[in-house]
Amino acid sequence: MRAPPPEDDDAHFDLKDFLPYLLNIAGEVTSSGFQTSYKTQYGMTRTEWRVLFHLGRYGAMTARDICARARTHKTKVSRAVSALERLRFLRRQKDLDDRRFETLCLTPEGYKAYKALCGKAGEFDREVSAQFTAEENAILRRCLRQLADLP
Amino acid sequence: MRAPPPEDDDAHFDLKDFLPYLLNIAGEVTSSGFQTSYKTQYGMTRTEWRVLFHLGRYGAMTARDICARARTHKTKVSRAVSALERLRFLRRQKDLDDRRFETLCLTPEGYKAYKALCGKAGEFDREVSAQFTAEENAILRRCLRQLADLP
DNA sequence: TGGTATTAGTTGAAAATGTAACTATCAACG
DNA sequence: CGTTGATAGTTACATTTTCAACTAATACCA
């Protein structure tokens, strides 16, 4: 019983062209480059950073809105919101018309953290983008937004 | 004490342009579209699928090689290899010259699973790619390969 | 009204991942 | 030799994520 032979022909398509694979690796490599910013300083996870960023950038909204905008599952968002609340970075307020909803908004401390991280994120993004031309950056982002199916 | 105002000006850069974020969401959306193929049929995780794909596509190699090629941590690869071994999809063989190494190769059953999944992956990739022009696809993949820092 | 279906959000258990420490093997150099 | 350091891979433990079931509130509709 021998092992199947190594094949390098065109019978298979190449893993290095498979979009889900490439996107995951690229996402992991770049994200872990940035995560030290929020992890070491604030002890935040990636999901918590995402929630903070949404509230900082777009203002008060419900967990449901964040789920939709970030295409993130509600349990992840729920736990991130609890964690940020423990950090006193956000507050919840029950909607009086429909009491299933809670409007989330950052506290001044949360907003301060957001602003600080926002600066670092911008810097990081400029560094990463510098290796591509303006046209490449435009196409890359357009394709990614479309793939991510963002609103 | 009021909440910070919603800001939609240019003081902050936009989350929808932040590459690590876009890459993660796009990767998650596309990957979860494909994962049913290996998850429901074989009960494999994403990492296991990656290892299977590497061995199927490029032939026998060590865990260390897979770590380097897929930029994946050795503990993830180690566990994926054990799982695939339990499924009888691969075998290990100690290198006699240097007994720290184990050469991994697919069994015929593992290879069969690879071929089946490979077909689905190709089909999936063609569908995803169809929404972009040839030029966009080329630029997208080139940028992603560079970001992923693949060998 | 009342019953059924939806929706927002939470929780517990299981699975996956990250981190650090560990074993075993080999290399290098005195 | 023998000590030190590096490397391949595993394991234990903590954190994070996933999945399914759950509560509470509202919508729909006969």
Image (cartoon, coloured by chain):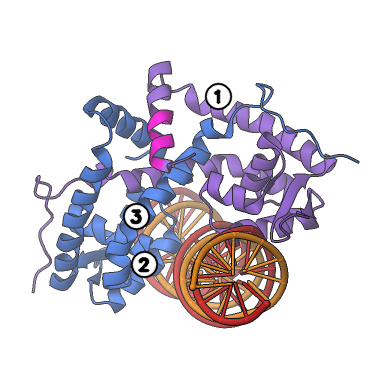
Chain colours: A purple, B blue, C red, D orange
Residue B82 lies within the magenta run? no
Q: Where is residue B26 in the image (x, y as percent from the top left)?
A: 42, 43
Q: Give the range drawn in magenta.
A: A141-147
Host chain of mark 1: A
Above/below status of D29 relative to C1: above
Name the side, left or right, on which C17 lies relative to A94. left
Above/below status of D17 relative to A130: below
**Amino acid type indicated by mark 2:** Ala
User: Which label belongs to residue B33?
Assistant: 3
Host chain of mark 2: B
Name the side, left or right, on which A100 lies relative to B62. right
Name the residue that disc number 1 marks: A126
**Amino acid type indicated by mark 3:** Gly
Prevailing SS of the magenta stretch = helix
Label 1 element class: helix
* Residue farthest along the right direction in this orientation: B1
Host chain of mark 3: B
Above/below status of B149 relative to B94: above
Which is closer to the viewer, label 2 or label 1?
A: 1
